[in-house]
Amino acid sequence: MNAPLNTSSTPSRLALTVGPVLYHWSRDTLMHFYASLADGPADTIVLGEAVCARRRELRLDDWLALGRDLTDAGKEVVLVAQTLIETEADLRLLERQAEQQSFAVEAGDASALQLLAGRVPLVLGPHLNIYSREALVEHADLGAQRWVAPVELALDKVALVNPSQDPVRTPTGEVIATEAWVFGRLPLAFSARCFTARHHHVSKDDCGFRCLADPDGLLVSSTEGQPFLVLNGTQTQSAAVQNLLGDGPALRAAGVTRLRLSPCAQGFTEVLNDFDAVMNLGKAVDGRVAAWVDSGMPGPFSNGYARGLPGMTWSDA
């Protein structure tokens, strides 16, 4: 039996989703990270490699075993499909994800949808081009039960795509849940070329896994010395870290019921606990972000996209 998605929560609670680890961490680091989440406030944990097929610290069987352990700890588990499907090996892995019967799968690209649709509970990842209600309806017809809004979509536009007073539904009448990216460096682009390998003047196929040395990616600064982008293998990210800790009312007004937090190498457990405290327990935001910086959190922070402003903008108002 396919595991159904938990698309509901108590009216006052915003469910917390820990997205996939986007960086190349060692096996031991990954296992310690997920062990630290087992007793925490996360409702859903997304497992798997989304960025680079060459990163094989954990294989699919390892991810499945880890998923079972986290399920036993009371977490909902979702597998993530690789964002760029380039080779026959990538297709075979996607096929195996579609064949397993334990977990929902998050599609990272439209190329995965037809293979996954109707075979496993389907989550629409943030890289899919869903910018209108009509597009979400079309994907709901494929059996999708949850969507993660594109990171550059302002919250007032998210509300138009899937309004809480008239939500998009699956063919069986279930409400499509809306998840918003509230923390973490923003994914901007993927490429068949590995920018980390290029930076080190080595080929992608003989990279030596240089990205293991950059647990939060490789920072690129402008000629003026300002943080600009982050190179993460085949992925380009924003240097700024999306932080919507102070946007709870706007998130709820947009019909968002789930919050996605993208892992980072330092201070993530504190961030997760703070989002739960502020969003679900009514605690104040004051002082929390400053404590993140003290813990070694990469920065700077931004919230511009969510507010309809340039993405690098940060306002604590």
Image (cartoon, rainbow, N blue to C red):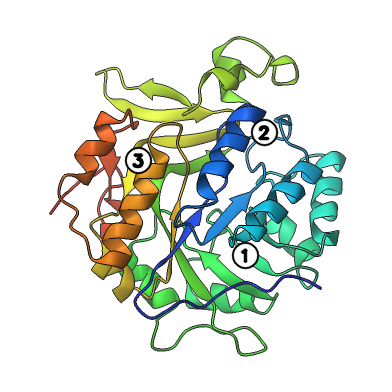
Residue in view at x 85 percent, y 53 percent:
96
Instruction: Of the two numbered discs 2 and 3 on the same chain, state the one appearing first in sequence.
Output: 2
Q: For mark 1, what is the residue?
A: 123
Residue 21 shows in the view: no
Binning the other alpha carbons within 10 Å of mark 3 as few (below 14), some (14 to 19) or many (20 upward) gives many
For the residues labelled 1 and 3, the Cα–Cα distance comes to 24 Å
Horizontal and vertical percent position of residue 140: 62, 77
**Vertical order, 211 against 168 (above or below):** above
The Cα atoms of the two marked residues, 2 and 3, are separated by 24 Å
The residue at which mark 3 appears reads as 241
> At x 42% / y 71%, what residue is drawn?
257
Q: Amino acid at mark 3?
A: Val
The answer to which of marks 1 and 3 sits earlier in the sequence is 1
Please indicate, yes or no, whether residue 252 appears anywhere in the rendered image: yes
Given the image, on which type of amino acid does mark 2 rest?
Ala
Q: Secondary structure at mark 3?
A: strand
Disc on res. 192: 2
- Label 2, label 1: how many angstroms apart (C-alpha)? 24 Å
Residue beneath the point at 87% across and 42% down: 88
Amino acid type, mark 1:
Val
Determine the residue positioned at 67% across, 45% down: 48
Q: Is residue 250 above or below residue 174?
A: above
Circle 2 SS class = loop
